[in-house]
Image: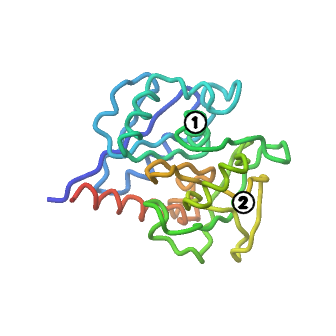
């Protein structure tokens, strides 16, 4: 009998993409998907923790700056330090940077406006669980919805990120050529940590994961990522 993987989706005050994420991941019969409240101190034996998008704590101070101190984040940090898989999308990416689980920071878009539209991204490499099965020559159409999505890091950090192949996605045009909707350094749309078990991305794959939405490019990201986790559980 095939084992299942347990996926915990953390809900912070102000999260608004948690149910979207649960719905997108629940289509996989091998996955048990459940919600975790920000005050929980038990990850319920999760194999994957997802920090969804939204406006945790109203985005006061900086996006993700308060959520980083929620009780559950102590458990998430410990889980990640032991090699556990963590995915942060949009506000979740911001929280991971605030918690120092990922390098760099997400700053205000260079337009100083909230951007909500479909964009294209491409896998930068096939070096991590989230992009190993993706075609680096095939752009994916994934929506963004953020006001603070401009990735920034200092020169030394950027050199390290690039050298370690920690960029997982870059923004591009439909034909794969460089394009940049928010001013992110090097067109960065998502990164991982040096040990490649913590992932953050600003685009929302859960909003492009169902035929009824007219776009299933996000499903391609989840397919490969979860297949990797299924294989780990089976072994």
Query: In this view of the protein, which residue sits in the foreground, 175 or 158?
Result: 158
Residue closest to the far left? 1
Residue 187's disc is 2
Kindly identify which residue carries mark 1. Answer: 95
Q: How many marks?
A: 2
Query: In this view of the protein, which residue sits in the foreground, 235 or 146?
Result: 235
| Percent position of residue 69, x then y | 53, 23
Quarter of the image where the C terminus is located:
bottom left
Vertically, is 68 above or below 142? above
| Percent position of residue 130, x then y | 47, 60
Counting other residues with Cα less than 10 Å from the Cα at mark 2, is it few (<14), some (14-19), or many (20 or more)? many
Vertically, is 58 above or below 141? above
| Percent position of residue 227, x then y | 35, 63
Counting other residues with Cα less than 10 Å from the Cα at mark 1, is it few (<14), some (14-19), or many (20 or more)? many
Q: CA distance from mark 1 to mark 2?
A: 20 Å
Residue closest to the far right? 111
| Percent position of residue 90, x then y | 61, 45
Query: In this view of the protein, which residue sits in the foreground, 86 or 203?
Result: 86
Query: In this view of the protein, which residue sits in the foreground, 15 or 85?
Result: 85
- The kind of secondary structure element at disc 1 is helix
Q: Residue at x 46, y 61 (%)?
A: 128
Residue 80's disc is none
Vertically, is 111 above or below 181? above
């Amino acid at each position: 009998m095939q084992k299942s993987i347990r996926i915990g989706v953390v809900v912070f005050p102000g999260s608004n993409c948690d149910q979207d994420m649960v719905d997108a991941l629940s289509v996989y019969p091998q996955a048990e998907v459940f919600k975790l409240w920000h005050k929980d101190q038990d990850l319920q034996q999760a194999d994957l923790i997802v920090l969804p998008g939204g406006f945790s704590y109203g985005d006061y101070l900086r996006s993700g700056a308060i959520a980083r101190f929620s009780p559950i984040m102590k458990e998430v940090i410990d889980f990640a330090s032991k090699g556990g898989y963590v995915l942060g999308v949009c506000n979740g990416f911001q929280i991971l940077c605030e918690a120092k689980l990922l390098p760099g920071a997400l700053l205000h878009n260079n337009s100083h406006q909230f951007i909500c539209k479909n964009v294209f991204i491409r896998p930068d490499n096939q070096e991590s669980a989230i992009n190993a099965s993706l075609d680096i020559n095939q752009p994916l159409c994934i929506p963004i919805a953020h006001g603070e999505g401009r990735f920034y890091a200092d020169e030394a950090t950027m050199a390290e990120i690039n050298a370690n192949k920690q960029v997982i996605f870059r923004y591009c045009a439909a034909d794969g050529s460089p394009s940049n909707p928010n001013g992110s350094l090097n067109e960065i749309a998502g990164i991982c940590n040096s040990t490649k078990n913590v992932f953050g991305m600003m685009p929302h794959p859960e909003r492009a994961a169902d035929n009824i939405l007219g776009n299933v490019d996000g499903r391609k990201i989840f397919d490969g990522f979860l297949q990797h986790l299924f294989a780990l559980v089976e072994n």
